[in-house]
Image: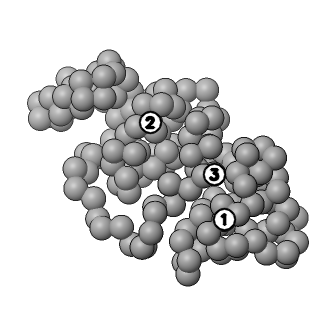
Amino acid sequence: MSRASYHPLIRLTVDALARQFSVEPRVLWDAVEGRPIPADVAAALVEAYDPGLRLTDFAIEGSTSVPNDATIGTVMQTQSAPHLFSGPRPTDHEWTRALRERGITITEAADALGVTRAAAKSWILPPPHGRKIPRAHAVAIRKRYGVPLYAWPNGITERVPKK
């Protein structure tokens, strides 16, 4: 779909948002149309529109992850639903900050650990909604990303992860 085929309100909104984020409008149009964008721009959009957007909603330059096609091409939400859990949002966890700094998605990190995205995400949800992280994974994350063992909100389990 070409930029000209969008409603003028959408074109003006994307251009205004680009100015707000101090990026070229072309970069945001790339995001809207599913083309790769810089990791820092995607992270800024996710932070601004959390929980309406996730890093996995974008194609990131240099990343092998495939974006979530369910949100590509939809109108961005300007209002988001209230946060479901008390305490800090899962994206405020030390591990997710370390991943963002490196331009890595939680899906890519989970794949490297041999677990699903859902399992990895459950380790950073606040209690009682989250799960304990297996010690082997906590140690691997500490070595790879520098996340201390005490950072896991649900604790650590000695259970051996399934292969």
Q: Earlier in the sequence, mark 2 or mark 1?
A: 2
Q: Which mark is residue 95?
A: 3
Secondary structure category for the residue under label 3: helix
Q: Earlier in the sequence, mark 2 or mark 3?
A: 2
Quarter of the image with the N terminus in it: top left
Say which of marks 2 and 1 sits in front: 1
Mark 2 burial class by Cα count in 10 Å: few <14, some 14-19, many 20+: many
Whether residue 65 is visible here, answered yes or no, is: no
Q: Residue at x 34, y 35 (%)?
A: 32
Q: Which residue is mark 2?
A: 42
Q: Position of residue 105 (x, y in %)?
A: 60, 44
Q: Position of residue 90 (x, y in %)?
A: 51, 60
Q: Are marks 2 and 1 in contact (CB under 8 Å)?
A: no
Identify whether 38 is placed above or below 159.
above
**How far apart are the alpha carbons under marks 3 and 1?**
9 Å
Q: Residue at x 51, y 46 (%)?
A: 56
**How far apart are the alpha carbons under marks 2 and 3?**
17 Å
Q: Nearer the viewer, residue 121 or 98?
A: 98
Give the residue type at disc 2. Ala
Secondary structure category for the residue under label 2: helix
Left or right of residue 144: residue 78 = left
Q: Which mark is residue 132?
A: none
Q: Position of residue 74 (x, y in %)?
A: 30, 46
Secondary structure category for the residue under label 1: loop
Q: Position of residue 70 (x, y in %)?
A: 42, 52
Whether residue 95 is visible here, answered yes or no, is: yes
Identify whether 104 is placed above or below 113.
above
